[in-house]
Amino acid sequence: MNATVISIFLVIVAMTLVITYYAAKRTNSASDFYTAGGGLSGWQNGLAIAGDYLSAASFLGIAGSIALFGFDGFLFSIGYLVAYLVVLFVVAEPLRNLGKYTLADMINARFNAKKVRGAAALSSITIVIFYMIAQLVGAGALIQLLFGIDYLWAVLLVGIMMTVYVLFGGMTATSWVQIIKAVLLMVGTVILSFLVLQRFGFSILEMFSQVKSATPHGEAFLNPGVKYKIPLDTISLMLALVLGTAGLPHILMRFFTVRDAKTARSSVMWATWIVGIFYVMTIFLGFGAAAFVGSETIISTNAAGNMAAPLLAQALGGDILMSFISAVAFATILAVVAGLVLTGASAFAHDIYGQIIKKGQATERQQMLAARYASVGVSVFSIILAIFAQSLNVAFLVSLAFCIAASANLPVIVYTIFWKKFNTTGAVSAIITGLVSALVLVSISPSVMNPEAGAAIITGTPLFPLTNPAIVSIPLGFLGGVVGTLLSKEANEKKFSEVNVRANTGGFRQL
C-alpha cells in the first residue's frame, strides 16, 4: 500500500460521495428514488445501462477467465454482447410502455393479482442477491490486493458504502455514479488494450501466436474445451448469457428512468455500442494478462483469477496505472451494487409492501422508508453469503444470476406481451417453475459440489452434470407457463388486447 494507490482510490470514491450528496437533495418522492423521476436522456441512460451491465464480472471476472482458460473465457464476452440484441428487439419498448417502477409493474399491467406481483418480486430479489454476491466477492479480492486488509472487512466496507449511496441518493445518485464509472472504465480499458497491443507490435496475429506459448494449455488455449469440456455445458452457458439479460431486473428497471419508449430504444442503442466495444477489448485484457502476468501469478493472487486486470495494469504501467485501474474497478463494483440494492429494495418496498401488504394505499413516505429498510436487509444478506463465496470466479457467479433471470423472468415477459391466452396461473407457474428448477439444479451441480476439497462450496459428487443448468431450467420455465395456463380456466384475452396495444404502440400513459 502506498500514497499513490490511496490517493487515486480516494479521489474516485470521494467523487461518488459528492454525487450522492447532491442527488440526495433532489430525491423527494418515490418516483425520484426508484426511477430518477424518469428524467434521463437517451445517451445518459445508455451510459447508465452500460455502467450497470459492465460489472465486476465483466471487468475482473472475464479478464481472469480469458487469461486462465482462453477461448472458453471469451464465451462470457460473446454471450453478454449478443444478449443486448434480445433486449433491444424483444423487451425494451413494450416494457417501457407497460411499466412504472419494477418488472412486476409491467406484468401486472395485464394480471392485476397479488400472487403474480409477489412471485415476480421474489424472483427479482433472488437474482439481485446472486448478482450482489459476485460484486462483493470481486470487491473483497480487490481491496485485499490494494490495501492488504482481510477479505471479510473488505466485503463489509463495500456493503456499507453502497447502502449509504442508495439510502440517501436513490436512482439519481446511482445513475450518475454509473455514468461516470462507465466513462472511466472505458478509458481504463482502452489504455490497457493499447499497451497490450503495443507490446505485440500492434499485431493481433502476433498476439495470438505468442499467447499460445505463454500458457500451460498451448494450442488448446485458443480453442474451446479448456474449461467447458462437455459441449452441452457450453451451450447451456450461452443460453443463460444470451437470454438472461432480458430478464435481469436491475437492467429492466433502467427503462423506467426515461420519459418514453423512443428514449428507451435510444438508451439501448447507446448501451449496445458501449458494451460491444468494451467486450471486444476484453480479449486484449485476458491475453495480455496471460502473456505478461502469467497464470501462476494470477492464481497465486486470487484462485478464481479475479485480479488479472489490475495485475496486468501493474505489469504494463506500474503502481500508478494499477491504482487507476483498481480504483475504476472499485467504482464499477460500487455503482453496480448500488443499482442492485436499489432494485431489490424496490421489489420489496413497492411490490411486496406497497402493493401486497398495503394494497396500494402506502404513502410515498411509507414506501421510501420501506425501501430504505429493505436496502439494509438486502445488503446484509448478500454480505453474509459473499463471505462464503470467496473462491468463486465472479463471471461464473453472474452467469448463475443470468440463468435464473432467463428461466423465471423471461418466459413470463414473452408470454405477457405475445400470448393471448396467457393468464394469472400461467404467470405464477412460469416464474416459480423457472426459479425453483434453476436453484435446485445449481445446488446439485459441479458449481456447488465437487469431489476435490476446497474446489467448490460442498465436497461431494455432483448429482447434475452441467455447471450452468440453463438448457434445462429455461425450457422448464416456459413449459410451466404453458401448463399453468392450459390447466386454468381463467380467461385473459380481453386484457391482452388492451395491453398488446399499449406495449407495441407506446399508447400507455406518460409516467
Image (cartoon, rainbow, N blue to C red):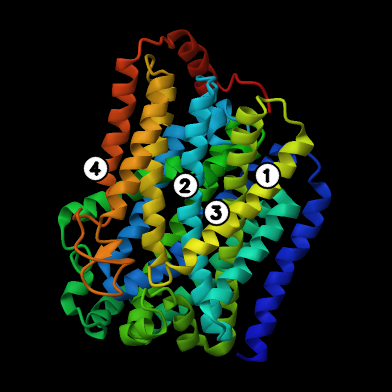
Tell me the residue at 64%/35% (across/down). 353
> Helix, strand or loop at disc 1?
helix
First reached walking from the N terminus: tag 1 or tag 3: 3
Residue of label 3: 52
Residue at 63%, 71% (x, y): give it.
157
Mark 3: secondary structure: helix
What residue did someone put label 1 on?
A: 371
Whether residue 47 can be seen here: no
Q: Position of residue 248 (x, y in %)?
A: 47, 44
- Say whether disc 4 or disc 3 marks the residue closer to the N-terminus: 3
**Viewer-nearest residue: 74 or 106:** 106
Quote the CA–CA distance across marks 2 and 1: 16 Å
Ranked by sequence position, the earlier of labels 1 and 4 is 1
Say which of 202 and 60 sits in front. 60
In whole angstroms, how far apart are the C-alphas of marks 1 and 3? 20 Å
Residue placed under numbered mark 4 in the picture: 472
Between 331 and 279, the residue placed more toward the observer is 331
Above-or-below relation of 134 to 64: above
Q: Earlier in the sequence, mark 2 or mark 4?
A: 2
Q: Which residue is mark 2?
A: 126
Q: Label 2: how many residues lie within 10 Å, few (<14), some (14-19) or many (20+)?
A: some
Contact (Cβ within 8 Å) of mark 4 with mark 3? no
Q: What amino acid is found at the position of numbered circle 2 in the picture?
A: Thr
Distance from Cα at disc 2 to Cα at disc 4: 19 Å
Q: Which callout, 3 or 2, points at the residue further toward the start of the chain?
A: 3
* Residue shown at the point (34%, 38%) measured from the top left: 434
Task: Say what secondary structure mark 4 lies in.
Answer: helix
The Cα–Cα distance between marks 1 and 4, rounded to whole angstroms, is 34 Å
The quarter of the picture where the N terminus appears is: bottom right
